[in-house]
Amino acid sequence: MVEINPWSSKIYEDYEELLVNFGIERFDESMWKDLPNPHRLLRRGVVFGHRDFGRIKRAISERKPWVILTGLMPSGKMHLGHKMVIDQVKYYQDLGADIFIAVADMEAYATRNISFEESRKLAVEEYISNYIALGIDPEKCQVYFQSKREEVKNLAYVFGKKINWSQLVATYGFTSSTNMAHAYAPLIQAGDILHVQLEKFGGVRPTLVPVGVDQDPHLRLCRDIARAFRFFNVDRARDGRIGVFLKTEQDVKKLLDVAENVVKGYGLRDIERIDDYRAIYLNDAKDEDIELLNEEMAKAEVENGGYGFIQPSSTYHRLMMGLDGGKMSSSRPESAIFLSDDEGTVRRKVLSAKTGGKVSLEEQRKYGGEPEKCMVYELFLYHLIENDEELLDIYNRCRGGELKCGDCKKLAVELLNQLLRDIREKRGDEKEIEKIISD
């Protein structure tokens, strides 16, 4: 069985297997076609999986509050793989999402031995200034450092009450040699994701975390934590009936009174309350009522001393390959195009990139190329060509043997250098950067 490790350099090739083994739902056309001006990463299947994205779609269509939580690991220079996440964040910000971006300085210290001072320097100079250049609106975004946000650390400590060592071992493969700061990092990430639902930061609302598939263990753990800290569960019972089920043995009558009021306020009338079972059966409820009622219950929990966390939704994108065909990584400079690369460096890296072309021009014309294996085509697909018809034309001409690898590389160099010039001109100044950073 394939394993997922958030801290490894593993390349994932069989995304279909990941969908099956980890219960990730397919992100197909039905998920994005109704969104306003769907982003190219959604249209082209780069975003291939999701958990509960329907909840986000409903918030968008009904113009209800929702929030994005994403993060950055300050361990090296920002490259095109990182840009891919911010492209999605920018798109969702335009659709009305509140944006929170965590600087994972505690995780960087625990897993990569990067000091907090170095993390701050990298975050400001390499990431935050580029986020502004990529269109993130500082007025509608919070960037914060894990080590500085007390709510995140406090939640992580509280969450530890519900998580034991065996669960961390099963999820992350930790061993007896794993240091405790590393073991604590997943709880900090859960604090990142769920603290945006605290009243101070906007309250309970749908939360989306767009990530590469390597980060799914964090999402699975966080969803388990969110569920564990709820008072109520709205679901189908074993006998098939939909009900509201109280998960605590304290204040049973009071909390069932709360639930009954929510149910009646929602409009359901054919109900059967059984206090001994800590349950209210909803005989006139339908499947589509489960999620909506769950959100109403969540708000009621907050009013009665609970957290009321809604399980975070997530989308999963394919990990961008490096120019050499391996994993794109800040620690391997030749594998990545950094947003700070000068024009000469871009040219050198692209000209040496792995392609899907044949060994000779004659064979290329005879048999055609393989754009699916071409790192230059991947640059077009993910970042450089917005028009789908233009991209399809390049694909077909490559497959048909009409297009030479040198021509594609020349075009990629031109488009990349123009992109990076635009980013350099729009990078945030000190005042804009300070405006976007929060405690």
Image (cartoon, rainbow, N blue to C red):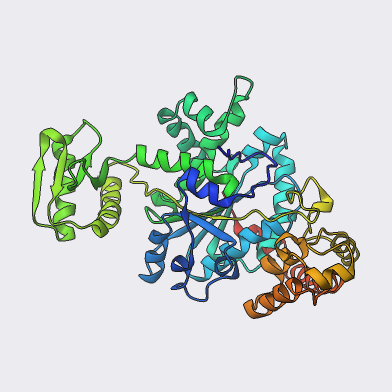
Looking at this view, is 386 or 95 the one in front?
Answer: 386
Q: Classify residue 415 as left or right of residue 226.
A: right
Place of residue 264 in the rendered image (x, y in percent of width and height, measured from the top left): 13, 56
Label total for image: 0
Q: Classify residue 303 as left or right of residue 120.
A: left
Q: Classify residue 198 as left or right of residue 407.
A: left
Q: Quadrant of the N terminus?
A: top right
Looking at this view, is 244 or 140 the one in front?
Answer: 244
Looking at this view, is 72 or 15 the one in front?
Answer: 15
Which residue is the extreme one toward the top? 176
Q: Classify residue 43 as left or right of residue 250.
A: right
Place of residue 299 in the rendered image (x, y in percent of width and height, measured from the top left): 29, 52
Place of residue 221 in the rendered image (x, y in percent of width and height, measured from the top left): 47, 39
Whether residue 23 is visible to the viewer of this picture, yes or no, is yes
Q: Residue at x 16, y 58 (%)?
A: 265
> Picture quarter containing residue 374?
bottom right
> Picture quarter containing residue 117?
top right
Q: Residue at x 39, y 48 (%)?
A: 311
Residue 343's place in the image compared with 219, above or below, is below
Residue 231's place in the image compared with 67, above or below, is above
